[in-house]
Amino acid sequence: MHGGWKLGLSRGGLIRCDVMRSVLISVAWTVLVSFCTFWFCAMVWLERRKNPGVLSDQGHSFSFLKVESGAERGRTGSALGHGFCLPKFWRWWFLLGLVLRVGEARVPGPVTCEVEPKRSNPGTGFSLGVCNANGVYDKLHCLEDLGVDVLAITETHLSEKSLKAFRSQLRVQVPTPRWLVHGKSVLPRGEVSDVGLYSGVGVLSRWPSHCLPHSWEQVVFGTGRLCVMSSFVHGLWISGCVVYGPPSGPTHPKARTVTNALLQQAFERVQNLSGPRFLRDDFNHDLSHLPIVEIIKNAGFVDLQDLNLSRNGLLPTATCRRRTRRDYCFASPELAPLFRSSTVLDVEWSDHGVLIGTFDCQEADKWRYPWPIPDSIDWSKLVPRYGLVQKDNV
């Protein structure tokens, strides 16, 4: 687990051990200062009870704080002859101790981390991944341990309240900035629970990311199964959609039809984008049962495991309970040349494996021409419209 030892709190929250240690030190120091203050006041009260008329020459300090010389101590015979006397050195240390405070500052400094999480592909490389997290609220440290640069997450279970809490966890627990692009938040499961229904999609990125506009109907986007975004990775904008198809069962009697419709909406949005693109999803169905998949493949999109088979000779592996392939990441013709390898990680916190693909971009890959310039037009070859007379013939 990255980030040191962490303690679980209520509602699944996590807090760092160093914060707990600072809180305990602050409490202990507060108790110590309170005790010293009480002792000081008690000594003042006892001094006034024993010698109500005895004050210093200035009339502002009591005899138990009075600094006596050696001759005066010889005449009194004891440092406690007229009250407790503190040496001058210890008196100033005592007064300084009442002012100091050990613990967290009111305005903490920048968060530092001695051990930065290892990235899957340093340098000009980056990684894309897709996983079904079965709820992300308690699994932020697990997602960080994967080391994926741009991770698409399906079935986040994030409602409106839990989404705000998860963003707060990102700001507190993760040492370096993270960007979370989430689709429509799902409805909570109950009135007393902030955990959402079994849906929700989003992207957790280590690179600057933002959501993209879309024209999906509110009924479609409100299902919490679609998300379109873009990430700025090594000077290269990588855009795409994340889709989560409903599984077959009594809850979703037309799951295949709905999944095919969702993929069609997502693919149309991806086709309107430019540059390297992706289509990452948890289909929950076989590809042969979804007609839209053939259209996606005919457009040049290839799944990462199929790319790994053609380039590295490694057979595709199951991603769901080690039995079936349900998680896919289709790369566009612009993104496929940057592909290097892919792998499926089996994790204990989900019944789905994590599909991770590594890529490498060079300086030439960053050049794009989003504004096409039209060619020059030979106006002499154009036929004039009826009723218009050219100036040369007048």
Image (tube, rainbow, N blue to C red):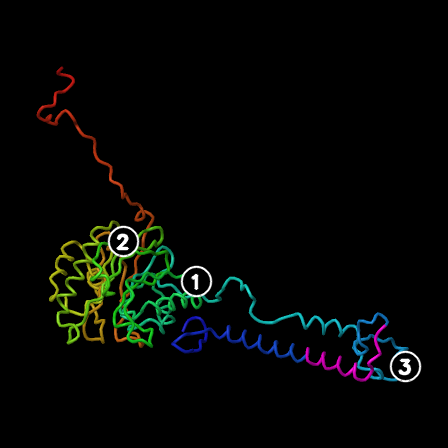
The type of residue carrying mark 1 is: Thr
Quarter occupied by the N terminus: bottom left
Q: Which mark is residue 356?
A: none
Query: Residue 377 falls in which quadrant of the image?
Result: top left
- Examine the rendered structure and indicate whether residue 270 appears above or below residue 197: above
Q: Which mark is residue 74?
A: 3
Q: Tell me what residue is drawn at x 22 percent, y 35 percent.
A: 374
Query: Residue 208 falls in which quadrant of the image?
Result: bottom left
- Cα gap from disc 2 to disc 1, whole angstroms: 27 Å
- Examine the rendered structure and indicate whether residue 316 appears above or below residue 63: above
Query: Which residue occupies the foreground of this view, 325 or 41?
Result: 41
Q: Disc 2 marks which residue?
A: 213
Q: Tell me what residue is drawn at x 35 percent, y 72 percent.
A: 137
Query: Which residue occupies the foreground of this view, 35 or 289?
Result: 35
Q: Residue furthest front?
A: 53
The type of residue carrying mark 2 is: Pro
Q: Earlier in the sequence, mark 2 or mark 3?
A: 3
Viewer-nearest of discs 1 and 3: 3
Q: Position of residue 364 (x, y in %)?
A: 31, 47
The type of residue carrying mark 3 is: Gly
Look at the numbered disc 2 and give the secondary structure of its residue.
loop
Q: Disc 1 marks which residue?
A: 176
**Magenta span:** 37-56
Mark 2–mark 1 CB contact (< 8 Å): no
Query: Which residue occupies the foreground of this view, 192 or 104?
Result: 192
Task: Tell me if 282 is positioned left or right of 120 in this view.
Answer: left
Viewer-nearest of discs 2 and 1: 2
Quarter occupied by the C terminus: top left
Q: Tell me what residue is drawn at x 76 percent, y 83 percent.
A: 46
Task: Tell me if 50 is positioned left or right of 161 in this view.
Answer: right
Look at the numbered disc 1 and give the secondary structure of its residue.
loop
Query: Residue 289 falls in which quadrant of the image?
Result: bottom left
